[in-house]
Amino acid sequence: MSFIKKNFSITQPANQILTIMLTLFTPLSFSGMMISGSKTAYQYDARQSLTPAPSGYQAFYIDHIGRHGSRYISKAKYEDIAYKILVLAEKNNQLTEKGKLLLTQITTIRELNKDHYGELSDLGRKDISLISQRMLKNNPTVFKGQKIAVISSTSPRAKETAEIFINTFKTKYSKLNVNQQLEDQQTLLRFFEYSPAYAKYKKNRIIKNTLKSLENDTKSVEMSENIASLIFTSDFIHQLNNGISLSENSLVKTQNFVLSVYQLYQELLSFSPLVLADNHLDFSGYFTQDQLLWFNTVVTAKNYLQIGPAFDSNGIQIKIAAPLLLDMLKTADSAIANKDIDANLRFAHAETVSPLATLMEIEGTNMVANPVTDYPSVWQADKIIPMAANIQWIFYRSEQADQPILVKVMLNEREVHLPLKTNNYPYYKWDELKQFYENKLNNWGLTNQEVVLKWLNKIK
C-alpha cells in the first residue's frame, strides 16, 4: 500500500470536498491491499442495498451486540521485539537502508502509541459513530423514544464505544446510561473468563502445537529469511537464525522478529489512511502479497482455534456464548410481549462476538476446516470480527395481528443466511428461529438466566 500526498486545487464547497476525501480515504478503499484478520478496520459498503421488509411489516425492535472500535495496539510486546532487534542491528551497523527505514517507522509507531495502549483510535471512534447513525437512519420506526437498554463490559474501550454509540440517540432518549455487570460477574459479555473447561481448552496441547507448527512451518522460515534479507546484513541474519536473547526468558529468532513486524503491520489499520500518510507509515515494501496471506493465516489461526469453530463448531469455545444467546432470546421475547423498549445494545469484544456468531450458525462462521491450515477458505476473521464488528437482530411486526413476527439478522450490517428455511430471505419467522436456538440451549442444559455462572463452571 502506498499513501501519496497530493496537492489539489478544488473550488467545490467544503462539504463536497469532505465527502470526496471520505470516499477516497476509507478503510474499504484499502481493503484489497491490507490483510489484517481481526485487526481489520470496519468496512461498510455504502453501495449495498437492503432488502425491503415484506408488505405490511415495520421494524419495531433491535437486539444488538457489538465489538469495540479500532484501537491502538493493546500491548507493547511486538513493538518491543521489533524495535530492540532493529536497534541492536543498528548499533553494529548491520541494517540495510530498508532496515533503517523500518526502524524509523517503528519508532514513529511507538510514539503514536505512547500513553494510548488499548484505547480507541480516532478511526475507531468515527466508525462506531457511523454505525449508530446508520442504525437510526435505516430503522426509523424502531426508535420511538420509549427506552434503550445499554450494557458494556468493564473494559474502558468497550465503555467508550458504548458512550459514542448512544450519543446518536440522545436527542430522542434523554436518560441513556451505560450499565455494566459487576467486575467479577460479567457472565453476559465476558463469559470466556468464567469457564474452567474453556481455560483448559485454550491451553490444550493440540492448539499450542498447531499454532507452533504454523510459526515454524518451512514456509514461515523461508519467507521470514527472505524478508529479513531486506532489513539486515547476512551476518546479523545468521545471529537471528540462531536466536538472540532480549531477556532472560526471551529468545527471538528470525520468524519471531518477522511475525512481530507483521503484527505491527496489522495494527496499522487502527489509524486512518491520512494518519498513516502524514507519518510516512508504509510496510508494503517488506511483504509480498503471498507473504501477507501466509502470515495472516499464521497469526489469525489463534482466533480460529480459540474463538472460532476450530475442530468442533459446537465445542466448548462456542458453547460458552450460550448465556449471551439466551439473554438475547429473553430480551427479544420481553420486547415483543411488553412493547416497552426499542433496543437492547451490548458492547464487548471479539471474544464475545465470534463465538456467538458461530453458535447462531450464521453462514460463513461455523465451518470446520480440515486440515486446519485451510481455515481461511471457510472462516475469515476480517469478515466476521473486524474492529467494531456487530450482530443486529431487527424485529418486524405486521399491521395485521394474525401475521407472525419476523426477524432479520445482520452481521456487520450485511444481511446473512441462517440455518433455517424461509420464503422471505433475509426475513425469518421469529417463533421458528427462537425454537431452533432454544433447542440448542436446552440440549446443553441452559434454560434459566439465574444459573448462568453455575452453568459456565460446569459446562464441558
Image: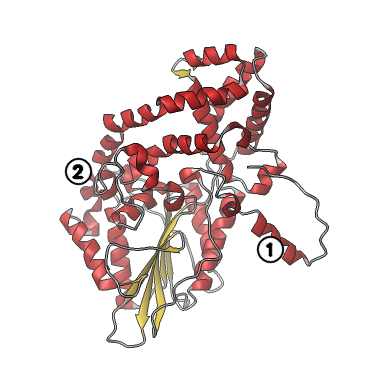
Q: Secondary structure at mark 2?
A: loop
Residue to which mark 2 is pinned? 460
Q: Quadrant of residue 442?
A: bottom left
Task: Judge depth for marks 1 and 2 and give the one in front.
Answer: 1
Above/below status of 2 relative to 160: above
445 or 9: nearer the viewer: 9
Residue 91: percent from left, percent from top: 66, 14
Above/below status of 310 relative to 90: below
- Which residue corresponds to the image point at 50% horizontal and 43% vertical from the top-left? 36
Q: Is residue 281 visible?
A: yes
Residue to which mark 1 is pinned? 19
Residue 300: percent from left, percent from top: 42, 39
Q: Is residue 151 left or right of residue 324?
A: right
Looking at the image, tell me whether mark 1 or mark 2 is earlier in sequence order.
1
Q: CA distance from mark 1 to mark 2?
A: 51 Å
Q: Secondary structure at mark 1?
A: helix
